[in-house]
Amino acid sequence: MALLEKKLAALNNPLQGKVALVTGGSRGIGAEIAKELALHGATVAITYVSNAQRAEQVVEEICEYNPNVSAFQGDVTKTEDISRLCNLVIEAHGTIDILINNAGITRDSRFMNMSEEAWNEVISTNMNSLYYMTKQVLPKMIEQDYGRIINISSIIGQSGGFGQTNYAAAKAGMIGFTKSLALETAKHNITVNAVCPGYTFTDMVAEVPEKVQEKITAKIPKGRFGTPLEIAKAVRFLTVDGDYITGQCINVNGGMYM
């Protein structure tokens, strides 16, 4: 009976005993990833910069089915904050098995009008944080001979985007980072992959005028925006069943071809 119970637990909660850290987990895709991993048994820690209320709301929603969740405030562009965040997560939960580098921002404008500040903010949040966060977490993963690192890139990093040279550069950089780090970490039973969402219906997209939304969906073979849950399911697949998948970009974009 004990063996049967263990097998059933493994099927129903395949991530039980694993600790996942999700940056930018208080909203949008990050929040949905946190919920999906927790639903499948993971202990989840999310980070947020300023909106404690939204972070607490995510924690409360997860607590309805998994009490092993926490939220930590910190800026992923600051090395001192990252060090503090990771130490707090390890202190609270013992380790970090899964790292989801999801934190990101946009500061769109045509390149000739793009300020140095807008360039630096996006590169720092979307790209540099990838280095800082992974650098902090990786030694623990190597020590335990296990880790799953998933970087949330974007279709814009593959196809480019009008008025998004900063964002496209950062998201394309994430892909190169993913492929290179995967080569170095495979021998340590650590996989590194990128998930590249297409146009996904988040709060930001909801604010776009309806006519603009129609123009975007007209370009998508599936004829609609993706949902944050669909992105989260791809992330969950890589954490649960992705043992032999590393250095890859998983496109979740409704059939768009770059």
Image: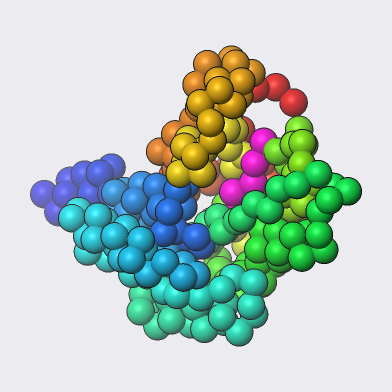
Magenta stretch mostly in which secondary structure?
loop
What residue is at 52 percent from the left and 16 percent from the top? 223
Q: Position of residue 34 (x, y in %)?
A: 39, 54
Q: Is residue 22 visible?
A: yes
Q: How is the image coloured?
A: rainbow
Q: Quadrant of residue 16?
A: bottom left
What residue is at 25 percent from the left and 44 percent from the top? 12
Tell me: 165 left or right of 210: right
- Check the image and report above or below for 127 versus 110: below
Q: Residue furthest left?
A: 1
Front residue of 6 and 103: 103
- The number of numbered badges drawn on the structure is 0
Quarter of the picture containing the C terminus is top right
Front residue of 105 and 178: 105
Front residue of 208 and 83: 208
Tell me: 107 left or right of 110: left
- Check the image and report above or below for 31 versus 254: below
Q: Is residue 66 visible?
A: no
Q: Quadrant of residue 45?
A: bottom left
Q: Residue furthest right?
A: 112
- Check the image and report above or below for 11 versus 27: above
Q: Position of residue 136 (x, y in %)?
A: 61, 75
Magenta-colored stretch includes residue 224: no
Q: Position of residue 182 (x, y in %)?
A: 70, 53
Q: Which residues are the magenta region?
A: 151-155
Q: Quadrant of residue 41?
A: bottom left
Q: Position of residue 78 (x, y in %)?
A: 64, 78
What residue is at 55 percent from the left and 68 percent from the top? 141
Tell me: 68 left or right of 219: left
Front residue of 241 and 257: 257
- Check the image and report above or below for 73 versus 155: below
What residue is at 32 percent from the left and 58 percent from the top? 58
